[in-house]
Amino acid sequence: MEPVIHLTDKVAIVTGASRGIGAEVARTFARAGAKVVLASRKIEGLTAVADEITAAGGEALPYAAHMGKTEEIQALVAAAVERFGKVDVLVNNAATNPYFGPMLNIEDAAWDKTFEVNVKGYFAATREVARHVQSRGGQGSIVNVASVAGFMAMPLQGVYAMTKAAVISMTRTLSVELGPDVRINAIAPGLIDTKFASALTQNEHILETVMQKTSLKRVGQPADVASAALLLASDMGGYFTGSVLTVDGGWSLG
């Protein structure tokens, strides 16, 4: 029998889970047997995804939390433990990109918001889950959704790219500091067909430029990222830590 990647008996928190990559990760994890806690700022979108998971026979808890606020992240993890007894897996996916344009023109408020959610939020959630896993003597897995923007020049998205470079650095350092209790890896998606990336996918010039450099000649889908997250989160990926798994159809090779 072929080996099957599963998350049976695992509890996973997925941030930014109301749509796009996060929602698809939550669905994929639930199909693989995990109990999933879905987090985002607004409860409405989360409830719709959670209802879908429940209707398919899974278990899901929607929970509204701002991932730039440490106290709300702490409350999120506490709610997950209260409902399901533990947390085994964290997928840091919630991100923001409020500014599109030359780096030198960004306002301080947009800079602060981008770093607050994309870096501070990832770190705060990682810290909270890692401490929980260590306190109960468990084994955990954390998956950070970064971006190929973290290791490429990215005109017009420079500050967003800086935050993703920081996430990659954080992933590598914490993999050393948290091993062997918690494995921590990152995924670096390329251009994925989501509302978040619509400024790129709906710009014909940008899209054509990216496709010229993309070996597989297509825009990625949320399921492409979710399958990578499943591998890294599961025991099948048990010897991955400190890795950055590029999921970009070959774009960054161009």
Image (cartoon, rainbow, N blue to C red):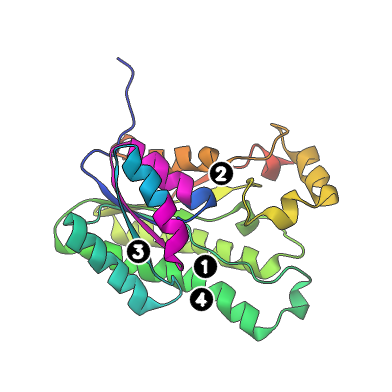
Judged from the image, the secondary structure of the residue bearing numbered disc 3 is strand
Question: In the rendered image, which residue does mark 4 sit on?
Answer: 116
The answer to whether marks 2 and 3 mark residues whose Cβ atoms lie closer than 8 Å is: no
* Numbered disc in front, either 2 or 3: 3
Q: What stretch is highlighted in magenta?
A: 23-48
Residue 186 place in picture, x, y as percent: 47, 52
Check residue 246 in the rendering and tell me which mark sits there, or answer none.
Answer: 2
Q: Which one is earlier in the sequence, the residue at label 4 or at label 3?
A: 3
Q: Alpha-carbon distance for marks 4 and 3? A: 20 Å
Which amino acid type is shown beneath numbered disc 1?
Asn
Q: In which quarter of the image is residue 248?
A: top right
- Examine the rendering and report whether any part of residue 18 can be seen: yes
Q: Which one is earlier in the sequence, the residue at label 1 or at label 2?
A: 1
* Numbered disc in front, either 1 or 2: 1
Q: How crowded is mark 1: few (under 14 residues within 10 Å), some or many (20 or more)?
A: many
Q: Alpha-carbon distance for marks 2 and 4? A: 24 Å
As drawn, 167 above or below 58: below
Q: How crowded is mark 4: few (under 14 residues within 10 Å), some or many (20 or more)?
A: many
- What residue appears at the point 81 percent right and 51 percent down from the top-left corner? 206
Judged from the image, the secondary structure of the residue bearing numbered disc 2 is strand
Question: In the rendered image, which residue does mark 1 sit on?
Answer: 118
Which amino acid type is shown beneath numbered disc 2?
Thr
Q: Alpha-carbon distance for marks 4 and 1? A: 6 Å
Which amino acid type is shown beneath numbered disc 3?
Tyr
- What residue appears at the point 85 percent right and 49 percent down from the top-left corner? 205
